[in-house]
Amino acid sequence: MTTPEKASPRAIAWQRRRASMGKVWQEFATNKGGLIGLGFLALAVVLALLAPLISDESGLDVTKAAGQPLSPPNGDFLLGTDIDGRSILLMTFWGARISLLVGFSAAILSVLIGTVIGVTAAHFGGWVSTVLLRFTDFFLVLPSLVLAIALSAVLPQGVWTVIFAIGVTAWPTTARLVRAQTLTIEGRPYIERSKALGGGHLHLIGKHVLPGVAPLVLANTTLVVGNSIIADATLAFLGVGNPAAVSWGTMLETALNNGAVTRGAWWNLLPPGIAIVLIVLAFTLVGRALETVLNPRLKGGH
Amino acid sequence: MSPLLELKNLGVTYTTGGGKVTAVRGVGLRLEPGDTLGVAGESGSGKSTVAMSVLRLLPRSAEVSGEILLDGEDVTTMKWGRLRAVRWAAASVVFQGAMHALNPVRKIGEQIAEPIRVHAPEGKPPSDAQLKARVAELLEQVDLPAARAGAYPHELSGGQKQRVMIAMALACEPRLIIADEPTTALDVIVQAQVLDLLGALVADHGIGLIMISHDLSVLAATCARIAVMYDGEIVEQRPSAELMNDPHHPHSQALAAAFPTVGDPVSRFAPATASPLPPEPDRSAADDRPPLLAAENLRVSFRDRTGSRIDAVAGVSLEVRRDEIVALVGQSGSGKTTLARTLLGLQKPDSGRVLYEGAAVPRGGAGLRAYRRQVQLVLQDPTSALNPRHSVYEAVAEGPRIHGLGADELGIVTKALEAAELRPAEKYFGRLPHELSGGQRQRVVIAGALALEPGMLVADEPVASLDASVRGEILGLLLRLRRELGLAALVITHDLGLAWNIADRVAVMYRGELVEVGTVEEVLLNPRHEYTKSLLAALPGGTAVRTVAER
């Protein structure tokens, strides 16, 4: 017998993984909508991360506001000012930080819960599945906005409460999706082979089921992020959450409550509104593009 | 008089993502009315493409060159309207896999009537009564009661569905029928009935028949001539009996050898494999140890939709000794696979027990895991038995990793792959299943089992989904493993030729029970049970013993 180099199989496996990632990227790159969405998202994330470096946070403080209340867009304030004389451009810029943070964290939380429940229900079947599915159905029929408001009212105010409230109400659709995908994988003969080799539950889930559902979960996550951002804006608009933090939702709320709308100050409403639309649209574009690349059922033709 | 069908220099090229692929080149065939022609070949040889080109049923990406003359008229240049009229009225097709070719939500009577309605002469649609009478007549021709016209496809058995397909093909009284693997999904007894039916219809109505199959003996049973295709070309075309007895082209020889004649001493313990087999080890030493694997009065039952119990396995006792291959044969639905799953501990028996080396197999926990190291499973379809995301190395290393044999994983995997005759092993490490051929995939599955150094393999139809030439190689491997490593095996099959090829003993299963167990020679050459006799009688090639008697 020859003695091959020790590292070869693992190295080959990694090489293979890199190659398949490259293939996914190539296919993704053919989708224009997805590329535009991804570019926009990358820009938004980078700008949000760099916000403290390229702008002055003190401008968000009501007491240090520099401009006149509700002045329309002009040379000093490109998007005008709000009722307290703060720059709308600066507020929209900083609002992205909260929206993205809440969006990502809530999405990860909800996808995590959904994946665990979906995989467990499908893998174990029997009464475990029945109980978990009824549990999922229960959350599915609850009006999630009302539940989220109730949760944020009961829990201490703050951004993590909002994340928690969105996360624990948004998971049931993910759980359903993951369960369906797990069931199709569990029906494949290679699961039977693995069982016959002596593989236990952890082995089956870790080696065969999770890698199989991961692409779908990834595509699903990007879509859930968009929904979470909308949920965050909705909650903030309704006055739930931290009123002190500047987010797109609170900007809309302030504009409505302080009479900016009745005075025709459109520059107070449009920037946060358009920002929400653009960022959610970008996530949806990326999510849909990922789905078509990763979900074989959506691939057209043969 | 012009021939019924004449293909002149037919070529078909498919345009795929990776360029042009020539599926068929330079094929010439001639069929007179009442003539029967078999087209044999492996998957990818172009045989189905030839058949489908006759009615221009090929996908858009196909480019056809040459001439296809149906009753002297060239199909390739026909106008769309004329082509529609020709389809089914002049030539019809019996498709492969009747279960998928019938519409599940429509009664079979309606489906048989559909072509008659479509091809009715202009302005004279047949009345419902006429249609009904014609459907009844067609069903009668295929030996189905006329009352079955009101049945839905799922209410029929596989053989009955195939008969419905044949009735549909006959509906417009075509002069040519193309049957694409009409019996592939059926088991031997039903296959014999369908073949008899096709043969009788051709003889009675003077219809031309083109039959496509990978199994030469099936073709020889029905067709007067056989054309063997290989790599898009016809390599040999001769009368069936001549070709079966003395195939010239190496590929025809391989096809003929792949399906051995039961009772022919030449093919006993000699599957069609290119590499030589080791000699039979000395097995005279008395073995007083308990049998390696034994089932005692196993009983497994399922509940059907109505809630009544059905015994899939009804009191089976079976022994597999060290160093022997036992073939478990029976029709589909006889409970073979359920028995295998129960032996492996994948299915809990209702009563009875499984003994390994004389000790009862535990039903769970570490004991069951240890048992699974000893008895390994090889599945029917290697394509689905391997995780498409796992490389060959990962697939083979899966077992050793589960059982924590990590010390020299690379060595174990290399040894297992080489034992399964994938040499050099390193070449295959990084491959993914879809980059391998069917035979190589099955070897990977076998290597994955060998990596645990088991005492026994349970193989469920290990060659049923493989091509003829690969079949012999995989059977040779199983036999070689027994002779070299003393690896026992329980091979589940519906194919008596396989049992004759490699098995030491045969167990015949019928409706959940073992009706006959004995050495291969006893059971196959001198069957005692009626069911075994009917299985043997249904073999399309017949058995050597019977052939001798007939001479």
Image (cartoon, helix red, strand yellow):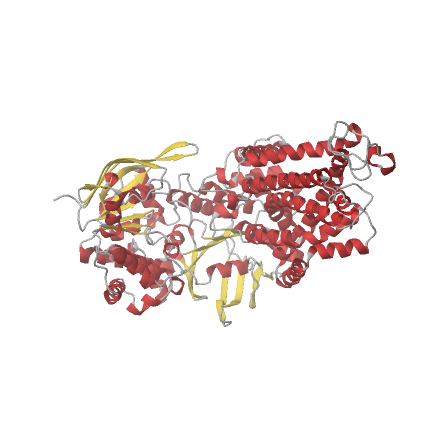
In this orientation, which residue lies closer to the viewer: B467 or A5? B467
**Residue A189 at x, y percent in the picture:** 52, 51
Task: Answer yes or no: is residue B526 visible.
Answer: no
Q: Is residue B232 above or below residue B346?
A: above
**Residue A69 at x, y percent in the picture:** 81, 37
Looking at the rendering, which quadrant does residue A219 occupy? top right
**Residue B478 at x, y percent in the picture:** 47, 47
Task: Answer yes or no: is residue B112 visible.
Answer: yes
In the shown orientation, is residue A86 left or right of residue B215? right
In the shown orientation, is residue B71 left or right of residue A204? left
In this orientation, which residue lies closer to the viewer: A4 or B195? B195
Quarter of the image containing the N terminus of chain A? top right
Q: Is residue B222 above or below residue A9?
A: below
As drawn, the residue found furthest toward the left would be: B1
Looking at the rendering, which quadrant does residue B189 occupy? bottom left
Quarter of the image containing the C terminus of chain A? top left
As drawn, the residue found furthest toward the front would be: A263
As drawn, the residue found furthest toward the right would be: A63
